[in-house]
Structure formats: C-alpha cells, structure tokens
Image: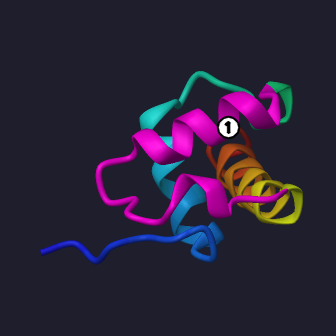
Amino acid sequence: MPRELTWSDSEDLGILLSEAHPEVDPLSVRFTDLHKYVIALPNFKDDPAKSNEAKLEAIQMAWQAEFMDRTQG
C-alpha cells in the first residue's frame, strides 16, 4: 500500500506531479493551481489548509527538477 503524503513530502510530490502532468512546465503553474494539483493526487492525505508559499515552492522546485531531468535526457 502506498504511503500517505503530506505537504512536507516535496520530492515525492514533485515526482508524482511530473508523472501526472508530463506536458506541463512547472514554472508556468500558479501556486493556486499547484495547490489543486497536489490535493488531487491519490496518496495526498494532508489538510489542504496547511499549505503555505514555502511548501508550495519546494514542491514546485522538486517538480521542476523532474521536468528538467526528463526534457534534457
């Protein structure tokens, strides 16, 4: 059974977002949309109200790293 993810699991969330939205450039995503993407992930079980700018930025940067790995080979 997959483990439940929280706002602190930025690396794991970045990987899952990269898989769920392979065509999306993470740096083009507004934080309001990023929040929606994260809470829609099946293993995400944290309180949606516990997000903040720093947590969303960490998730976006982890997603960006996955995006760059995929697009640059």
Percent position (x, y) of residue 15?
A: 53, 57
Q: How is the structure coloured here?
A: rainbow
**Residue depicted at 63% across the width and 55% down the height:** 49
Q: Nearer the viewer, residue 47 or 34?
A: 47
Q: Is residue 27 left or right of residue 37?
A: right
State the residue in front, 10 or 51. 51
**Residue depicted at x 58% and y 22%:** 23
> Is 17 rendered above or below residue 44?
above
Question: Which residue is located at x 55 percent, y 53 percent?
Answer: 48
Residue 8 place in picture, x, y as percent: 63, 76
Q: Is residue 28 left or right of residue 62?
A: right
- Look at mark 1 in the image and give the residue it sits on: 34
Residue 39 colored in magenta in the image: yes
Instruction: Give residue 52's position: percent from left, percent from top.
Output: 80, 59
Vertical relation: 14 (above or below) 34: below
- In the rendered view, tell whether residue 30 sits above or below residue 54: above
Q: Which residues are magenta?
A: 29-52
Magenta span contains residue 44:
yes
Q: Residue furthest left?
A: 1
Q: Amino acid at mark 1?
A: Leu
